[in-house]
Image (cartoon, helix red, strand yellow):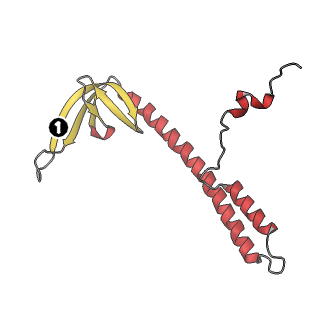
Amino acid sequence: MANTIDSSLMLSNYQSQTRKTGSDILGKDDFLKILMTQLQNQDPMNPMQDKDFIAQMATFSSLEQMTNMNKTMEKLVAFQEQNQLMTYNNFLGKNVTWHKLTESSEPNQEPIIEEGTGKVVSIQYKNNTAVFILDDGTKLEPANISQLNE
């Protein structure tokens, strides 16, 4: 009798199976499944009223429109961020005048206004905000620049 290896004992059969779970967000497909299950399992002696069905379909329609609007808004925000970065590239190599408020270390003291000029040598884009870096190492936000000098 020959020795054979039982395929059910192979390592690949014992490796952990990844468990698939649904997401926490209900989408339009989930809503349709719930509605179809509700229609299939309704009491034949007391079926769903027309107004209830219409209200659920209106809710479904609203959900679909909100989902579409959310996707469109995400695209718009991404486009706006790219457009903003391209616009800020015009500042590279230019001299700017800037103003910056610094909180005083003393309580109940007015903030200190720092002023200066410098040449923009770099622009970083972090956390959806542009940061201008001047030749002296000063980091500014776009709102801090008050004048573009030639």
Q: Looking at the image, which is closer to me, 72 or 107?
A: 107
Q: Amino acid at mark 1?
A: Glu
For the question of whether residue 76 can be seen, the reply is yes
Instruction: Describe residue 82's horizontal placement relative to residue 150 as left or right.
Output: right
Q: Is residue 83 above or below residue 55?
A: above
| Direction front: furthest residue | 1
For the question of whether residue 150 can be seen, the reply is no
The quadrant in which residue 126 appears is top left
Locate residue 60, reporting x and y percent.
68, 62
Instruction: Describe residue 113's horizontal placement relative to residue 54 as left or right.
Output: left
Please tell me which residue is depicted at 59% across the width and 47% down the height of the picture: 72
Q: Is residue 123 above or below residue 54?
A: above
Q: Is residue 70 above or below residue 59?
A: above
The residue to which callout 1 is attached is 114
Please tell me which residue is depicted at 72% across the width and 75% down the height of the picture: 52
Q: Quadrant of the C terminus?
A: top left
Locate residue 33, reporting x and y percent.
74, 59
The quadrant in which residue 36 appears is bottom right
Locate residue 94, reporting x and y percent.
31, 25
Please tell me which residue is depicted at 64% across the width and 59% down the height of the picture: 63
Locate residue 123, reporting x and y percent.
36, 28
Q: Quadrant of the N terminus?
A: top right
Instruction: Describe residue 72's horizontal placement relative to residue 52 as left or right.
Output: left
